[in-house]
Image (cartoon, rainbow, N blue to C red):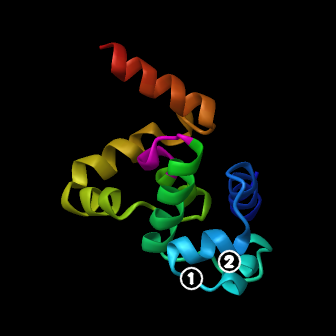
Amino acid sequence: MDFPQRLRALRREARLSQRGLAERVNVDFTYLSKIENGRVEPPSETVLKNIAAVLAEELGLDGTELSDELITLAGKIPSDLAETLARNPGAVRFLRSLGDDVRSADEWQRLIQGQETE
C-alpha cells in the first residue's frame, strides 16, 4: 500500500472526515484531499507527525510507530535518524555492509528480532 492509500485507510478507520482530520492538524482540507489522491507531494515531517499523532490517538496506536510508518511511506527519512547517520559514519558503513542481504520488510524484521534477543 502506498502513502496516499495508507493515509486514507487510516483516516477512514479512525472515522474522521478529511475536513475533521485537516482541522485537527491545522491544514486545509483541500490540501489533505490532494495528498490522499496523490496530486501533491507528501507533506513535511512535522505535518506527518501531527497527522500520525491524531490518528494514533483515535485508533489507540503507538504514535511513534505510526509516525515512522507514515514518514517512510512518504519516501522520507525521519530527521532524528538522518541526524544520527550524519554524526556517525560507522552507522552508514554498517547499513552499507548489509548490502543485498536485507531487501524486504520481512528480512529487516528478522534482523531486528535477532538484535533484540541478543
Q: Quadrant of residue 40?
A: bottom right
**In the rendered image, the vertical position of residue 19 relative to residue 51, given as above or below:** below
- Single out the residue that lies furthest toward the left: 87
Bin the neighbour count of mark 1 within 10 Å (Cα to Cα): few under 14, some 14-19, many 20 and up. Answer: some
- Work out whether residue 113 or residue 30 is closer to the camera in this orientation and state it: 30
Q: Is residue 98 left or right of residue 81?
A: right
Give the residue type at disc 1.
Val
Q: Is residue 34 left or right of residue 58?
A: right
The residue that appears at 35% across and 64% down in the rendered structure is: 79
The reply to whether the magenta stretch includes residue 63 is yes
- Single out the residue that lies furthest toward the top: 117
Pointer 2: what residue?
32
Rendering coords of residue 59 (x, y %): 59, 44
Q: Earlier in the sequence, mark 1 or mark 2?
A: 1
The reply to whether the magenta stretch includes residue 34 is no
- Work out whether residue 13 or residue 65 is closer to the camera in this orientation and state it: 13
Q: Is residue 91 in sight in this rendering?
A: yes
The residue that appears at 75% across and 70% down in the rendered structure is: 36
Per the rendered image, the range of residues in magenta is: 60-66
The residue that appears at 19% across and 60% down in the rendered structure is: 87
Give the residue type at disc 2.
Leu
- Element assignment for label 2: helix
Residue contact at pointers 1 and 2, CB within 8 angstroms: yes
Rendering coords of residue 60 (x, y %): 53, 40
**In the rendered image, the vertical position of residue 2 relative to residue 63, given as above or below:** below
Pointer 1: what residue?
27
Rendering coords of residue 41 (x, y %): 65, 79
Bin the neighbour count of mark 2 within 10 Å (Cα to Cα): few under 14, some 14-19, many 20 and up. Answer: many
The residue that appears at 43% across and 27% down in the rendered structure is: 112
Mark 1 and mark 2: Cα distance apart in space: 7 Å
- Single out the residue that lies furthest toward the right: 37
